[in-house]
Image (cartoon, coloured by chain):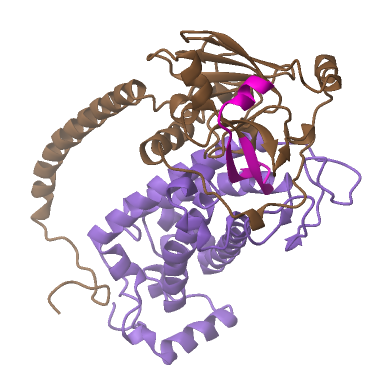
Amino acid sequence: MGDSVYIPSAASAVPTAVTSRHSALVRVTHWITTLCFFALLVSGVEIVISHPRFYWGETGNNLTPTLFRIPIPASRNLVPTGYGYVLPDQNGWSRYLHFEAAWIAVLTGLLYLISGLFTGHFRKDLLPDGADMSWRPFSTSIASHLRFRKPNEAEAWSYNVLQRLAYLFVIFVLFPLVIWTGLAMSPAFVSAFPATVNVLGGQQSARTLHFFVSVALVLFLLVHIVMVCLAGFKSRMRAMITGRAGTDMERK
Amino acid sequence: MSEPSRAEPLRAEPAHAEPAGRRLSRRKLITTGLAATAGVSALGVAVELAQKYGLIPPDHSGVYGGFYGLGETLTYASQRLLTRHSLAREFSRSQISKPPFPNELAPLPENFKRLQAGGFADWRLSVNGMVARPASFSLDQLKSYPSRSQITMVQCEEGWSYIAEWIGVPLSQVLQTVGVHPQARYVVYFSIEPDWWESIDMADAFHPQTFLTYGMNGGELPVGNGGPLRLRVPRQLGYKSVKFITHLTVTDNLKGFGKGLGSASPEAGYAWYAGI
């Protein structure tokens, strides 16, 4: 059956045997990370609301100029937001939740990284082929994305080149950056490792960068969800929950 | 290509794989059982060791039903293992924030206003608990010790920060004067403001940058910044640097203070350890 259909170089043939689209470890770590991400996002937003002003350099407060500010009311009444009211203060549980979720996410990420190196997950599933790294597959992939074309059957079993690069960027650039900029805000951590904040330009720079990287992660999440819906929400969710792949049509 | 790559079609398992799979599953059951037992014992040992070496924060089980105890314990234990002796970053004089930012204060109590009217001449710092010589210090007595200064950052949990020069006496100087018992584990400190109290472990209490500060940026410590006496703990967030300090107690157990969570912060929903 594999011989008769066109298979792009990046995609493996549709297997005839029952195998997992995603390994159990990838599925479990994916959903733990999802839960942690939402916890970090909600608690992060709550923490920002207490001081929705951003600065560059070492210090910044209500008496100093901002780099930019988010035009929302704050949950503390000293912040000059220009609004006449103060939002409820939710920092206590938000901070506890933020750091608990951060720990679980980091430990889950480590488990994923180590197992991914051992099983060849990064090399086999995420690193683009040599053949993919030329303009042709790139332009094909970009063009089919721009036309919102439904992926072919083989793509239910493998990632296209843009997907691979996006996931690699999130795993090896955005996640490490968000952890680093987070740690660079910790007074005790930077007392032992001052270079981690000094190279970023200061503690307020670290906070501002933490915000930007978080925004980038949220943008990735939005695109990720849209692509899952376009590719077939049920089949992609089934693949990430049960490991079984295939199109909706073929499974009924 | 000898090794299978994703470009090749995946093949079905050969038929004889099934019994091998069953044999393996018994082995798997035994190894999983052993691994689980080892895991639980290791966790038990880890908890014992963590308790012995003071790596478990006092608010680990008491706040929000203990739900956040895991994260708090991991944070505090990691910091104590990695950063016990590290020094907070110090800055140059040119980096001092002008003007220093005074955070909002609750209305000051009457006894504070009376002491303020007298130029804080009658301000006292009493020290008791697990000490050889309980004592009470006036500001002048504290100032008679060699004064130290540090240019460090105050970082609020809200997100803002400022840098100032803090002048005072290291807390370790006062603790050595009163003679702390070897089994002491925490220093609890109280503001003149009712219900404002905190505690730190001995690593922070004897840390060379933990100061009882009475001066700022070359002058007196302004009331807005915690004058006449503020405990500075520069390796933790601003809320551990309690303003208007009047009393210290040295203890080996925080259970008897407030709700037993270590300080007023966890009672208000905030982490006891604020070094993050």
Residue A186 % position (x, y): 53, 46
Whether residue A123 is in magenta: the answer is: no
Q: Quadrant of residue A213?
A: bottom right
Whether residue B158 is in magenta: the answer is: yes
In front of the other: A71 or B106? B106
In front of the other: A24 or A115? A115
Question: From the viewer's perspective, is residue A231 above or below residue B271?
Answer: below
Q: Quadrant of residue B4?
A: bottom left
Q: What residue range appears in magenta?
A: B139-167
Is the N terminus of chain A in the top left, top right, bottom left or bottom right quadrant? bottom left
- At a point 74% along the width and 54% down the height, the residue shown is A53
In front of the other: B55 or A102? B55
> Left or right: B253 with respect to B23?
right
> Is residue A242 at all visible to an observer of this figure?
no
- At a point 52% along the width and 59% down the height, the residue shown is A198
Chain identifier, colour brown? B
Residue A61 % position (x, y): 74, 50
How many numbered tags mark residues here? 0
> Left or right: B16 with respect to B156?
left
> Left or right: A121 with respect to B263?
left
Question: From the viewer's perspective, is residue B61 above or below residue B87?
Answer: above
Question: From the viewer's perspective, is residue B160 above or below residue B141?
Answer: below
Residue at the far right in the pictured view: A84
Residue B161 % position (x, y): 67, 48
Residue B250 % position (x, y): 51, 14
Q: Quadrant of residue B183?
A: top left
Is the C terminus of chain A in the top left, top right, bottom left or bottom right quadrant? bottom left
> Is residue B87 at all visible to an observer of this figure?
yes
- At a point 81% along the width and 57% down the height, the residue shown is A71
Chain identifier, colour purple? A
